[in-house]
């Protein structure tokens, strides 16, 4: 059958262990759609809005830690995948994107639904393949199957990411009545050994010697998935070397008792003298981006003597402009290997201890200031998040939308010990365009409670996250509706220009009530801090329905509260 090499793409993907496919409707992609839909080994879902579909696929891939297939028709459909592909690229999420296309000779000929699709995702995919439009030739078949093998291998290779395959297809696109979609049994699977990123004994010895020469070692963790063995290894390393660990909410290190959660808050408030006392000699980083602007500014200003970044492969970012060494192994192995249990004695040890204590003292000061603040202040959005975080069940996923939702939640932090709360956020590109869809992707393929905290702009932007036929029985959305982008009211810059409200905050009047009714979701509403507890009780009950808890509050009220909050933190420093 003419389309056999295309049908066999599904068989190859299945043999490579891929099990999930998100398919977007269209005719040009029919051979691919039918192949995945008819293959027994795939869980397929169909999502009509390609932008949402791609973010949903990103969420599924993130949850399952495995590549997910995305299929769309030709034309602008492919472009709608782009925001999620960029997010997946920077978050290192494996996606396998098949875009159906017209044959080459029909590009730029005013044929319907035709755009220039080769390399359409540019530099935001690890590689882009273009398949041949005629596959009778055995070399063409070999190429198609080699490309699929290579694409899957590449998507999984560190740093993982999206890989694109453009698939030009000639008509007829559907099998004739007497034809069946079947899969070949003798396809060539190209497997690849997982590299082991092991440091040589010489390097380990050298690093161990070097580490013991530094008395101010600071660890900074970027965004990463929860990994219990990493948490444990860091705990041991940091207590053995008396090294403070800065980990914001996306580092997923919150279960560690000693992690510094509030660096963003205290580095924005403390004076230069305190900052100087916090300056590291050796900075060790791992993971992706950090949320805190103040931590970034602090580290860029007061640079360490040496900065080591742990990353198994690929070019690391020099976020703090101080990188001096790239260490090619996994962070958990680094900390396990370099964990030196020997107790040093004397002056060196005391200096190390002091450094740890200085960081802990600032953390403690912030905790006290926050306690004081919340004992008698009214900050609708932050108070809701605080109460909510305290009531989270022991095992759940917490999804945080851009932009204030993730920042607010980082101000609050998650208590130590709560290792079952796993935190996700689209901080690859920090877009507001797919936060809900990504959370939906996770919810579709896990059975634990999933909570999304989002602002109103991000929420209404991505409402098509719900526009499909898959029940979301384990997704509850906490919507902070301040009728616009409060971030622009809070940060310096737009906060001071007369165009602020019209062009930056952009007031919008929607509430989620109608949306909830349309989609058949349970809807809870709260408009005062006093009612939060009662409402949260209902919100936290999982009874098989998607729930939205919307808090409406004014921008002014929250803005003022934020100013008081900042003052309270500053007053901890006597200013
Ligand atoms: C796709 C995209 N467009 C624009 C932006 C710029 N942006 C950042 S935050 C924001 C407003 C977010 O408003 P909302 O979701 O209500 O959250 P809040 O600021 O109120 O917390 C905008 C437009 C972005 N991050 N992503």
Image (spheres, helix red, strand yellow):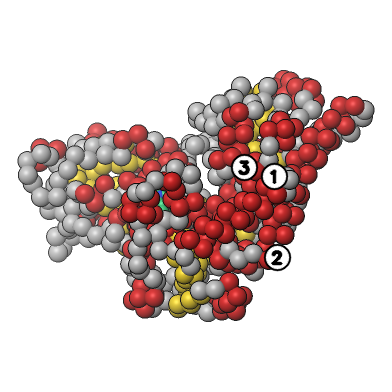
| Quadrant where the image shows the C terminus | top right
The residue that disc 2 covers is 375
Q: Residue at coordinates 65% horizontally, 41% vertically from top-left? A: 267
Looking at the picture, how far across and down is residue 447, in whole percent?
53, 67
The residue that disc 3 covers is 268
Q: CA distance from mark 3 to mark 1?
A: 12 Å
Kindly tell me whether residue 146 is visible in this rendering. no
The residue that disc 1 covers is 575
Q: Is residue 530 above or below residue 241?
A: below
Q: Tag 2 or tag 1, which sits nearer the N-term?
A: 2
- Label 1, residues with CA under 10 Å away: few <14, some 14-19, many ≥20: few
Residue 291 is left or right of residue 463, and the answer is: right
Q: Residue at coordinates 7% horizontally, 41% vertically from top-left? A: 109
Q: Is residue 281 above or below residue 48?
A: above
Q: Residue at coordinates 54% horizontally, 58% vertically from top-left? A: 560
Q: Is residue 205 above or below residue 565?
A: above
Looking at the picture, how far across and down is residue 191, in whole percent?
46, 39
Residue 521 is left or right of residue 319, and the answer is: left
- Label 2, residues with CA under 10 Å away: few <14, some 14-19, many ≥20: few
Q: CA distance from mark 1 to mark 2?
A: 20 Å
Looking at the picture, how far across and down is residue 113, in whole percent?
14, 50
Camera-side residue of 513 and 391: 513
For label 2, the SS is helix
Camera-side residue of 267 and 439: 267
Camera-side residue of 567 and 307: 567
- Depth-wise, is mark 3 or mark 1 nearer the camera? 1
For label 1, the SS is loop
- Label 3, residues with CA under 10 Å away: few <14, some 14-19, many ≥20: some
């Amino acid at each position: 059958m003419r389309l056999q090499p295309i049908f066999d793409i599904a068989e190859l993907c299945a043999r490579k262990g891929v099990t999930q496919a998100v398919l977007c409707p269209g005719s040009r992609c029919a051979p691919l759609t039918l192949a995945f839909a008819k293959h027994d080994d795939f869980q397929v879902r169909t999502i009509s809005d390609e932008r949402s579909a791609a973010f949903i696929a990103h969420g599924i891939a993130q949850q399952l830690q495995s590549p997910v297939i995305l299929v769309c028709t030709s034309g602008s459909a492919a472009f709608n995948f782009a925001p999620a592909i960029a997010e997946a690229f920077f978050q290192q999420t494996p996606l396998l994107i098949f875009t159906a296309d017209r044959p080459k000779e029909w590009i730029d000929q005013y044929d319907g639904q035709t755009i220039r699709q080769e390399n359409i995702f540019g530099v935001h995919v690890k590689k882009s393949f273009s398949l041949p439009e005629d596959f009778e030739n055995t070399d063409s078949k070999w190429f198609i199957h080699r490309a699929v093998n290579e694409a899957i291998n590449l998507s999984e290779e560190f740093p993982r990411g999206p890989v694109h395959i453009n698939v030009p297809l000639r008509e007829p696109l559907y099998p004739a009545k007497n034809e069946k979609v079947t899969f070949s049994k003798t396809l060539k699977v190209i497997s690849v050994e997982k590299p082991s990123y092991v440091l040589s004994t010489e390097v380990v010895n050298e690093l161990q010697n070097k580490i013991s020469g530094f008395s101010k070692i600071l660890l900074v963790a970027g965004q990463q998935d929860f990994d219990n063995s990493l948490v444990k290894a860091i705990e041991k390393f940091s207590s053995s070397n008396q090294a403070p660990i800065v980990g914001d909410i996306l580092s997923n290190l919150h279960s560690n008792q000693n992690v510094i959660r509030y660096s963003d808050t205290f580095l924005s408030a403390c004076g230069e003298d305190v900052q100087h006392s916090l300056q590291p000699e050796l900075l060790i980083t791992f993971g992706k981006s950090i949320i805190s602007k103040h931590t970034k500014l602090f580290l860029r200003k007061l640079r360490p003597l040496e900065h080591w970044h742990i990353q198994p492969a690929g070019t690391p970012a020099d976020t703090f402009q101080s990188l001096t060494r790239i260490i090619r192994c996994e962070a958990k192995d680094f900390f396990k290997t370099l964990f030196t249990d020997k107790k040093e004695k004397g002056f060196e040890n005391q200096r190390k201890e002091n450094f740890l204590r200085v960081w802990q003292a600032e953390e403690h000061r912030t905790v006290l200031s926050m306690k004081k603040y919340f004992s008698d202040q009214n900050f609708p959005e932050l108070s809701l998040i605080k109460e909510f975080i305290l009531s989270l069940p022991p095992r759940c996923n917490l999804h945080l939308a851009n932009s204030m939702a993730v920042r607010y939640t980082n101000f609050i932090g998650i208590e130590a010990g709560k290792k079952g709360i796993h935190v996700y956020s689209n901080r690859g590109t920090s877009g507001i365009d797919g936060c809900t869809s990504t959370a939906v992707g996770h919810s579709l393929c896990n059975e634990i409670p999933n909570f999304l905290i989002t602002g109103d702009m991000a929420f209404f932007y991505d409402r098509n996250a719900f526009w499909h036929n898959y029940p979301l029985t384990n997704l509850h959305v906490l919507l902070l509706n301040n009728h616009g982008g409060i971030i622009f009211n809070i940060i310096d810059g737009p906060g001071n220009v007369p165009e602020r409200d019209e062009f930056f905050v952009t007031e919008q009047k929607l509430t989620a009530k109608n949306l909830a009714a349309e989609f058949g979701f349970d809807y809870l509403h709260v408009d005062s801090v006093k009612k939060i507890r009662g409402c949260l009780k209902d919100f936290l009950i999982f009874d098989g329905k998607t729930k939205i808890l919307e808090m409406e509050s004014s921008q002014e009220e929250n803005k003022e509260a934020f100013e008081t909050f900042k003052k309270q933190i500053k007053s901890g420093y006597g200013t």
